[in-house]
């Protein structure tokens, strides 16, 4: 297609090794025809030691951003280490869910054949808007209707899975869907419901600067989608938990 740059072909591992870590990782992703959007996990394409290299790259480029903002980081003691701090924050904290594998989750068979409504939450979650990289702070409730073939996981594992999914730049609607897909694949329940309520700091900090608006969205699967009474029970219990 006109205007597209052809994917470079390297004749040896030495050629690839001389590239910056971000280019090496991108080369592997493109070679595998794998998407790498802001909310995708790319851990399978990162080799040992490359996170540290990425951090150094981001620090260098962040230093350039500060320079372009006309901030004198040499004489301003408050910003002297800002580029390093931001690089570490992005790669090992707020966007960590992009760069590390899924946390280990032990699954147990449903020996007791539990088939009643289970609710986990509220789970506090922290994410970032992919449009402005501003924080998203919220809560998630998870409703499950297991069956005899479902896999049961511990309460803390729901928190870990939520954190892994949410620690990426994204929009809330996609984050909830990704979380639902992950839990559906792992637990295999008859029904799955997720509700997320979040505060978006891109609304507080810029634009309309409205500090009251919250966003709430949900995903309903299986029995929760088909059975209005089950859906009503789940939502009514959330209202009671919120003091409604």
Image (spheres, grey):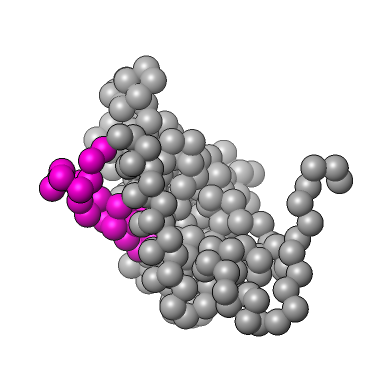
Tell whether 162 sits left or right of 43: left
Is residue 62 visible in the rendered image? The answer is yes
- The residue positioned 57% from the left and 39% from the top of the image is 228
From the viewer's perspective, is residue 226 above or below residue 145?
Answer: above
Residue 34 percent across, percent down from the top left: 69, 62
Up-down: is 190 above or below 240?
below
Q: Is residue 182 left or right of residue 1?
A: left
Residue at the spot 65% in from the left edge and 76% down from the top edge = 15
Query: Horizontal placement of 177 versus 106: left or right?
Result: right
Residue 37 among magenta residues: no
Outermost residue, top side: 208
Figure label count: 0
Residue lying at 48% horizontally and 60% vertically, measured from the top left: 98
Q: Nearer the viewer, residue 121 or 135?
A: 135
- Chain part drawn in magenta: 71-93
Residue 87 is one of the magenta-drawn residues = yes
Q: Where's residue 91, x and y in %?
A: 39, 60
In-image side of 8 versus 180 (left or right)? right
Quadrant in which residue 156 is drawn: bottom left
Using the rendered image of the protein, determine whether residue 189 is visible from the camera's viewpoint: no
* Rendered location of residue 55, percent (x, y): 39, 63
Q: Which residue of the protein is positioned furthest toward the left in this rendering?
A: 77
Q: Identify the residue at horizontal 70%, vertical 82% (top origin).
A: 12
Closer to the camera, 74 or 170?
74
Q: Quadrant of the C terminus?
A: top left
Residue 133 coordinates in the image, percent (x, y): 41, 41
- Relative to the observer, which residue lies in front, 239 or 185? 185
């Amino acid at each position: 297609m006109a205007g597209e740059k052809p994917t470079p072909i390297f004749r040896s591992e030495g050629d690839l090794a001389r590239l910056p870590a971000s280019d090496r990782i991108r080369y592997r992703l493109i070679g595998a025809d794998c998407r790498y959007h802001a909310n995708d996990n790319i851990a399978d394409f990162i080799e040992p030691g490359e996170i540290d290299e990425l951090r150094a790259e981001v620090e260098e480029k962040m230093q350039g951003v500060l320079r372009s903002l006309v901030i004198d980081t040499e004489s301003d003691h408050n910003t002297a280490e800002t580029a390093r701090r931001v690089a570490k924050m992005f790669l090992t904290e707020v966007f960590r869910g992009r760069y590390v594998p899924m946390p280990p989750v032990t699954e147990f068979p449903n020996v007791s054949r539990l088939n009643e409504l289970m609710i986990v939450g509220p789970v506090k979650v922290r994410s970032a808007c992919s449009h402005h990289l501003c924080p998203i702070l919220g809560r998630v409730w998870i409703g499950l209707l297991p069956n005899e073939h479902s896999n049961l996981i511990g309460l803390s594992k729901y928190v870990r899975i939520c954190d892994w999914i949410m620690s990426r730049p994204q929009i809330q609607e996609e984050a909830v869907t990704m979380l639902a897909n992950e839990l559906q694949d792992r637990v295999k329940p008859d029904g799955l419901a997720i509700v997320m309520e979040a505060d978006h700091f891109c609304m507080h900090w810029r634009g309309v600067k409205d500090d009251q608006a919250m966003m709430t969205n949900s995903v309903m699967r299986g029995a929760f989608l088909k059975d209005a009474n089950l859906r009503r029970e789940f939502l009514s219990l959330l209202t009671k938990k919120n003091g409604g």
